[in-house]
Amino acid sequence: MHRLCTEDDLWRHICTATWPSLQDPSARHVISTIPGGYRSIFSDAFPSLHHFSLRPHRPPPPPPELISAVDIYYQGKPVFSRVKRTQTQKNWFLSSPLWLDALEPNELIPTTVKFARKDEEWLRHFEENLSVSWIVVDPAQGRAANVSSRGAVAARRHWLTRDLEVVYAAEMAGERQHAMERVQCVVKVTCCGKVGGELHVREVNLVMEDTEGRHVTGKEGLAILQRAMECGERKRIDHVRDKERFENFTCLMKEKRECKRKREKAKDVASTLLAFLALLFFCFIAGSKT
């Protein structure tokens, strides 16, 4: 039984059946270099990642690249799979907001789903039937994590283009800073199309944001991901809790933005008042001299 449970072919079959993206040759090559192979990947990527501890941890140096294995499912059946490699030691990645794209620029992925006009019912249908897995692999440390909630936490229309946006999120511990003690990885699938025609996937991207809505940089985000891969727990997926966490995080962001806006408004009023008092003072000095 022990020999059977450690058979790499068995775990390869389980992994590729669960995440078809891992059939990609580049993914197979990376997994072959990781101790434990597919068994280690499955242990790290299934089930959902839970990381809420801020215990001290010195992250390893940034890996040369980050591997993203992305799978989209409609009604439980895979409709899109892609493996992307991201160079992580370039200055543009480390200093810019963490932003990972699964699609190429201007790429459209056709689906068999029809574009509908009934918003409320249609959005609810996609929230319940479209799911996403986004596995991030650190090949240097041989660790991985699934940073998507798998089930959608929100489905909405873009306010300008009216494209369909389906959102997935995974909250995790950040850095020991006020706004970054909690962060969330947000995966967004953007679909476009015409009423009556087929729906096309136009964008699939991942970002990380803190409680003030600020996008975390690549350097910060990479350190958070490495800590989550090593220290995070893997627990059963709970769609209700995931949605509640996303809504609470969104409310917290709105509250902090409102507080920030009020502070900035108070500063503007104080600056204006000081400038006015300074003007009165100089006018008084000038008047007394004359």
Image: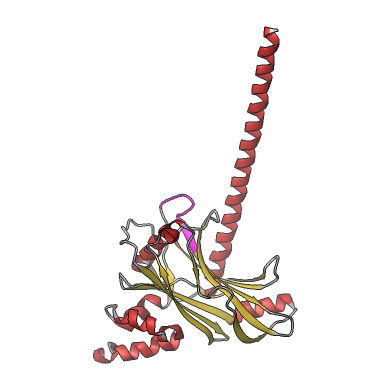
Residue shown at 41% from the left, 55% from the top: 175
Image position of 236 (left or right of 160): left
Whether residue 39 is visible, yes or no, is no
Residue shown at 28% from the left, 92% from the top: 4
Whether the magenta-drawn stretch holds residue 245 is answered as: no
Query: Which percent across, then down, holds residue 158?
Result: 67, 68
Q: Nearer the viewer, residue 146 or 188?
A: 188
Query: Which percent across, then down, holds residue 250?
Result: 58, 60
**Image quadrant where residue 2 sits:** bottom left
Image position of 114 (left or right of 184): right
Q: Give the residues in magenta.
A: 176-184
Relative to 277, residue 135 above or below: below
Relative to 35, residue 186 above or below: above
Residue shown at 61% from the left, 77% from the top: 127
Image position of 195 (left or right of 230): right
Whether the magenta-drawn stretch holds residue 179 is answered as: yes
Query: Which percent across, then down, holds residue 273?
Result: 66, 29
